[in-house]
Structure formats: structure tokens, C-alpha cells
């Protein structure tokens, strides 16, 4: 547990923005030191503003893992992009994460054009440097700094942890003075029920390669603490069509069993309690156009 310092404390919000798959969720987990955001190879997996909380010296850092910024096509896409940009307005620092291996994508170009209007201090973070030659990294950093006024540039590998400590120290040195907003041992402001649902959704993404995960959502319906110290969790995976329900279940229920086993292990590790997880799959037609579902995910419902 991090001890609350006796002298002056600092506290601030750091918004991580960037294109899908730039590594924002992996970086937040590395900064916090444990899983608070889902990580998959698929794009656009983060839907909600999961806040990871870390302590460095006298500073408490509240990291906002935003949905990736991309060209929206569906109503859900528009809500995710609006949420990502909205998170920058209340942040003390905005960190733009770039996949250095991929270079400047079309989504990054769009972000750079809008970033000039963002008022908080801006930091450039080049990720996946373990996969790129150093001369190319320096050229990329120089090019991007010519586009926007960045207060600092960092080269990191969120996956290996290289450079993450220096980045965290810089954030801690540049957030404003003020009281800590959360208890010293809290790592996220996401309720455990929501975190558990996000973990199951991660396993759904990793297991299925069709479009099903993008048309699905997971809700924790029951969370019951048992006398033996374990937790009984019942979750429902909602899909839009019966054909999708059959895919999630798999032949003889093998797919849903595998998803449940993987999710149960990660949820138990996250909450440090034994878990009994029960998954149900139901069809909820048009859930992507239901304002209530958006509110549950912490997103604004875009009217059109």
C-alpha cells in the first residue's frame, strides 16, 4: 500500500489519447502496476473511461484510458470518439500515444489537427520502441514536434516497461498541488462489477475473431459475497442476433466455457478472492441504439 505523504501532496488527471491499438490500455496497466483496462489485439476495445490510479512520491495520478480516436461509422463509434475528446477538457495533462512501429496513421493525422485546440499541457509518447530502429524514432519524434507544441517527448515500450518509469515520474512532477482524491490503495474508480464485466468482454474479444465482439456487451447482473470468502458472479453477454448467440456459445458450449474459465481466473486475480462465475448469453436486438446501454458504459448517447 502506498502511504499518504505528510507534506504537500499533488494530484492530477492524465488523459491518454491516440489511435486504436496504439497501446493505451497496456500503458495504463503498466503505469498502475496491475490490470485496470482490457487489452486485446483488436481495435476499439476500450469503450468506457476507465480511470487507473497510481501514486508516485507525493503525487496521485489519475489516468484516463480513453476510447481510441478513429473515423466513426456507427452510433456507438460516435459516442466513443466524443467521449475520448471530452476527457481532454478536464485533464491536467494530455498524452498523445503513437504506435512508433506504424508511424503517423490517418487517425493520428486527425488527432494532431484537433490537438492544437487542446489547452492542457501536451506530451508526446512514442510506444513500441523495441520494434523500431533508433534513427527512425528520432525522425518521427522530430516530425511530430514540428506539428504540435509538446511539453515533453518520451520513447517507451508499454509492453516491456522500458521508459514507463520516467514517464510516470514526469507526470508526477507536473500535476498541480492538491489533496489526493482517492484512498492510497485504490487503483481504479471503476466499480468491481464493471471491472469484472470488462474482463469478460476482453476474453470475448480474444476468443472470437468474427465481428460478434463489436456487437456485444457484458453486464454483471449478480455479485454475491459468500460466507467462505468467495464471490458468486453472474453475467449476461448480450448480442444482437440469434446467430451471434450460437457463435458465442460454440459447439456443445465449448466457446462460452473457455471464455468463462479465462475470465474467472483474471477476475479472481483482480479482486484477490475466489470467484464462481456464471455466464449467460441473450439476444437483445438493437442494444447499440439503446440510450440506457450507453449510460451504463459511461458514454453520452449521440442523438444522430
Image: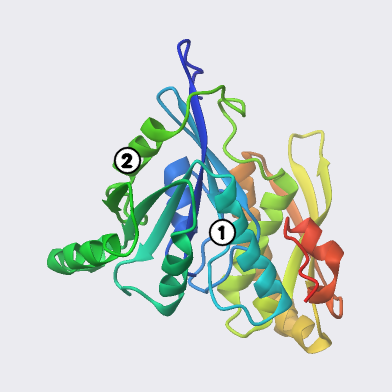
Q: Is residue 82 above or below residue 282?
A: above
The image quadrant that residue 262 belongs to is: bottom right
Residue 256, by quadrant, is bottom right
Depth check: give the residue in front, 83 or 257: 83
First of labels 2, 1 by sequence position: 1
Which residue does the numbered mark 1 point to in the structure image?
38
Residue 235 seen in the current view: no
Residue 70 circle label: none
Closer to the camera, 13 or 195? 13
Q: Extreme left residue here?
A: 135
- Quadrant where the C terminus lies? bottom right
Q: How is the image coloured?
A: rainbow
Q: Residues within 10 Å of mark 1 (few under 14, many from 20)?
A: many
Residue 98 shows in the view: yes
- Helix, strand, or loop for circle 2? helix
The residue drawn where x is 64% and y is 50% is: 267
Q: Residue furthest front?
A: 117
Q: Which residue is mark 2?
A: 165
User: Could you give the CA–CA distance between mark 2 and mark 1, rounded to whole angstroms?
Assistant: 21 Å
Residue at 65% x, 74% y: name it.
77
Task: Give how far across and how far down residue 78 sits, in percent.
Answer: 67, 72
Amino acid at each position: 500500500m502506498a502511504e499518504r505523504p505528510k507534506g504537500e501532496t499533488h494530484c492530477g488527471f492524465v488523459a491518454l489519447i491516440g489511435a486504436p491499438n496504439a497501446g493505451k490500455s497496456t500503458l495504463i496497466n503498466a503505469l498502475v502496476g496491475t490490470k485496470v483496462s482490457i487489452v486485446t489485439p483488436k481495435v476499439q476495445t476500450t469503450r468506457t473511461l476507465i480511470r487507473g490510479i497510481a501514486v508516485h512520491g507525493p503525487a496521485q495520478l489519475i489516468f484516463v484510458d480513453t476510447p481510441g480516436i478513429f473515423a466513426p461509422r456507427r452510433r456507438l463509434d460516435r459516442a466513443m470518439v466524443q467521449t475520448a475528446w471530452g476527457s481532454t477538457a478536464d485533464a491536467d495533462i494530455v498524452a498523445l500515444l503513437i504506435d512508433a512501429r506504424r508511424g503517423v496513421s490517418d487517425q493520428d493525422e486527425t488527432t494532431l489537427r484537433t490537438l492544437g485546440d487542446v489547452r492542457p499541457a501536451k506530451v508526446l509518447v512514442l510506444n513500441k520502441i523495441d520494434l523500431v530502429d533508433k534513427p527512425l524514432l528520432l525522425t518521427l519524434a522530430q516530425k511530430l514536434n514540428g506539428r504540435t507544441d509538446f511539453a515533453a517527448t518520451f520513447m517507451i515500450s508499454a509492453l516491456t516497461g522500458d521508459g514507463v518509469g520516467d514517464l510516470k515520474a514526469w507526470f508526477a512532477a507536473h500535476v498541480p498541488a492538491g489533496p489526493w482524491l482517492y484512498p492510497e490503495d485504490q487503483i481504479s474508480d471503476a466499480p468491481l462489477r464493471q471491472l469484472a464485466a470488462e474482463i469478460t468482454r476482453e476474453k470475448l474479444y480474444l476468443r472470437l475473431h468474427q465481428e460478434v465482439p463489436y456487437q456485444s456487451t457484458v453486464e454483471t447482473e449478480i455479485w454475491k459475497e459468500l460466507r467462505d470468502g468467495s464471490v458468486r458472479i453472474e453475467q449476461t453477454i448480450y448480442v444482437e442476433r440469434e446467430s451471434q448467440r450460437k457463435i458465442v456459445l460454440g459447439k456443445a458450449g465449448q466457446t462460452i466455457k473457455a471464455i468463462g474459465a479465462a475470465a474467472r481466473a483474471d477476475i479472481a486475480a483482480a479482486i484477490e478472492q475466489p470467484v464462481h462465475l456464471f455466464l449467460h448469453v441473450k439476444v437483445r436486438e438493437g442494444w447499440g441504439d439503446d440510450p440506457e446501454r450507453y449510460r451504463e458504459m459511461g458514454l453520452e448517447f449521440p442523438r444522430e
